[in-house]
Image (cartoon, helix red, strand yellow):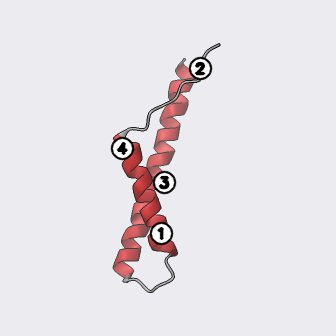
Amino acid sequence: MEEPEVKKKSIFQKVKNGLNVAVQVLLAVPVKLPSVLLDGARYVAMLLGLLDALEEEEEEKEDGND
């Protein structure tokens, strides 16, 4: 019986997940924050979404080549 492959999270993945949580907290906080901070959080969220999409595309290419 084969055990399923468990991918270890890289440091990059851990940092990305931490940033994602921080951005979600900043955008959901009910207090008025400076617009510069919110704009920065939105850009980081957009960048993280882009990185996720690129990683998924790369994984699909790798799976297709097997």
**How far is disc 2 from disc 1 in space, using C-alphas?**
36 Å
Quadrant placement of the C terminus: top right
Residue 59 place in picture, x, y as percent: 51, 32
**How far is disc 4 from disc 1 in space, using C-alphas?**
20 Å
Type of the residue with mark 4: Phe
Q: Which residue is found at the position 50% from the left and 26% from the top?
A: 62
Q: Earlier in the sequence, mark 2 or mark 1?
A: 2
Q: What label sits on residue 12 in the rendered view?
A: 4
Residue 12 place in picture, x, y as percent: 36, 44
Q: Which residue is found at the position 54% from the left and 24% from the top?
A: 5
Nearer mark to the viewer, of 3 and 2:
2
Location of mark 2 (residue): 3
Q: Quadrant of residue 44?
A: bottom left
Nearer mark to the viewer, of 1 and 3:
1
Q: Which residue is found at the position 44% from the left and 86% from the top?
A: 32
Q: Decide: is 30 above or below 53.
A: below
